[in-house]
Image: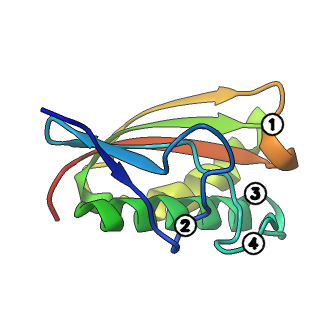
Amino acid sequence: MPKQVISTGKAPGAVGAYSQGIIVNGFVFTAGQIPLIPGTTDLREGGIQAQTRQVMNNISAVLEAAGSGMRKVVKTTVFLADINDFAEFNAIYGSYFPEDPPARTTVQAGALPAGALIEIEAVALLGS
């Protein structure tokens, strides 16, 4: 089955050799999303909670453009600039998955693009 590239103006555009998302074999794979405000090169200000909300909204936009959604997410990988932000991140993250949260890996990264505090990538089932 051929892959399908996903692109939407409702999430930050790709700034390198990658796609916002890819559909293949009934799954949607998102690129790692940092807290860029769509249509700009500006990071969301306001600390880890505000940045987590922006990242989750960016992921949601890519998934919706693919014909999926947050309820279909099966796996996420979370990169935190500082693992001490885990509790604040987790409080916001959890609000996006009130039931049956996906599998998740969370690690502290040495550095994230553009000085972001967080980056998240997701895998979801296709279909809303």
Sort mark 2 into few (<14), some (14-19) or many (20+) by Cα contacts within 10 Å: many
| Residue type for callout 1 | Asp
Q: Which residue is the site of mark 4?
A: 40
User: Which residue is rendered at x = 60% and y = 66% of the image?
Assistant: 53
Rendered position, 116 above or below 95 = above
User: Which residue is rendered at x = 57% and y = 50% of the image?
Assistant: 90
| Residue type for callout 3 | Ile
CA separation in Å, label 4 and label 1: 25 Å
Is label 3 in a helix, a strand or a loop? helix
Q: Which residue is the site of mark 1?
A: 82
Is label 1 in a helix, a strand or a loop? loop
Residue nearest the observer in this picture, 25 or 99: 25
Tag in front: 2 or 1: 2
CA separation in Å, label 3 and label 2: 19 Å
Q: Which residue is the site of mark 2?
A: 11
Sort mark 4 into few (<14), some (14-19) or many (20+) by Cα contacts within 10 Å: few
Q: Which residue is the site of mark 3?
A: 48
